[in-house]
Image (spheres, rainbow, N blue to C red):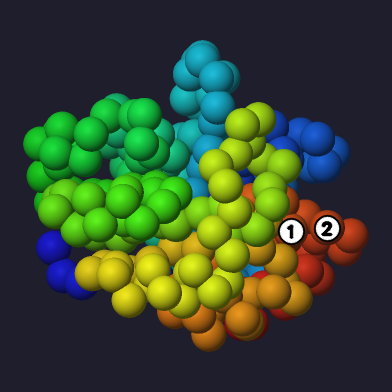
Amino acid sequence: MPTLTLPPFYPILDAAAVERAGLDTLEAVQGLVDAGARIVQFRWKGPYTRRAYETALAVGEIVRQAGALYVINDRTDIALLAGADGVHVGQTDLPPQAVRSMVGEKLFVGLSTHNEAQLRAAAAEPIDCVALGPIFGTASKENPDPEVGVDELRRLAQLAARPLIAIGGVTLETAPAVLDAGASCCAVISDWMRGDWRGRSRAWAQL
């Protein structure tokens, strides 16, 4: 698989966060790609019911029609069934070697890390990109790992052998500093939904 290139704005369509914001999931993903998002990750925490699966398929259809990359969070099986371009797993999901054995070269594989030890260990894994976070405080997880911060991001970015995704509390206002510190892109769960979400998504996509 060729070297993966990620756009600076990496929106995560978290079903629970979208619902809390009072948005319709399909309207939200259509708005993201209309705003110029070139990659979208679908994140569904909880049981993968038939509704969840059908939503993943519908989101993927919109993303692919826009010519953007589609990524599924956590679930390698759903990523394959939904025709995604990539799958992103965490430290407690299937290990990257198992994921790679399932997807071969069909999908790119991302892995979340939260500290230097995990980031160093990721260098030996069969992955295409690595996430580091939370960079700042985040409300998207019940028990978040300690904040990394921009200064530590700058130091650790030098250890990343693959595109580095900064995640956790990154806002439109802090994104330039995060990118300057060495991140390839900013994964954003909630900030693109603040206020005029369509306008904010456009501003994000213009980074």
- Residue 50 seen in the figure: yes
Mark 2–mark 1 Cα distance, whole angstroms, equals: 5 Å
Q: Residues within 10 Å of mark 2 (few under 14, many from 20)?
A: few
**Residue at 49% over, 49% down:** 41
Inspect the image, locate mark 2, and give the three-letter code of the amino acid beneath it. Arg
Residue 94 picture location, percent across and down: 27, 29
Quarter of the image for residue 157 reads bottom left
Q: Contact (CB < 8 A) between labels 2 and 1?
A: yes
Q: Which mark is residue 191?
A: 1
Report the residue marked by disc 2: 194
Q: Nearer the viewer, residue 158 or 176?
A: 158
Label 1 residue SS: helix
Q: Is residue 9 above or below residue 49?
A: below
Across and down, in percent, residue 118 comes to 32, 49
Where is 193 relative to 98, above or below? below
Along the line of sight, the residue nearer the viewer: 52 or 192 = 192
User: Is residue 187 visible from the viewing direction of this image?
Assistant: no
**Residue shown at 59%/65% (left/top)?**
149
Q: Residue at x 31, y 51 (%)?
A: 117
State the residue at coordinates (16%, 70%).
2
**Structural crowding at the residue carrying mark 1, measured as other residues with C-alpha within 10 Å and reported as few (<14), some (14–19) or many (≥20):** some
Judging depth in this view, the residue of 68 and 206 nearest the camera is 206
Percent x, y of residue 100:
15, 41
Q: Which residue lies most toward the right here?
A: 195
Which type of secondary structure does the marked residue at label 2 adopt? loop
- Residue 207, percent across and down? 61, 82
Q: How many marks?
A: 2
Res 162 label:
none
| Amino acid bearing label 1 | Asp
Q: Which quarter shows the N terminus?
A: bottom left
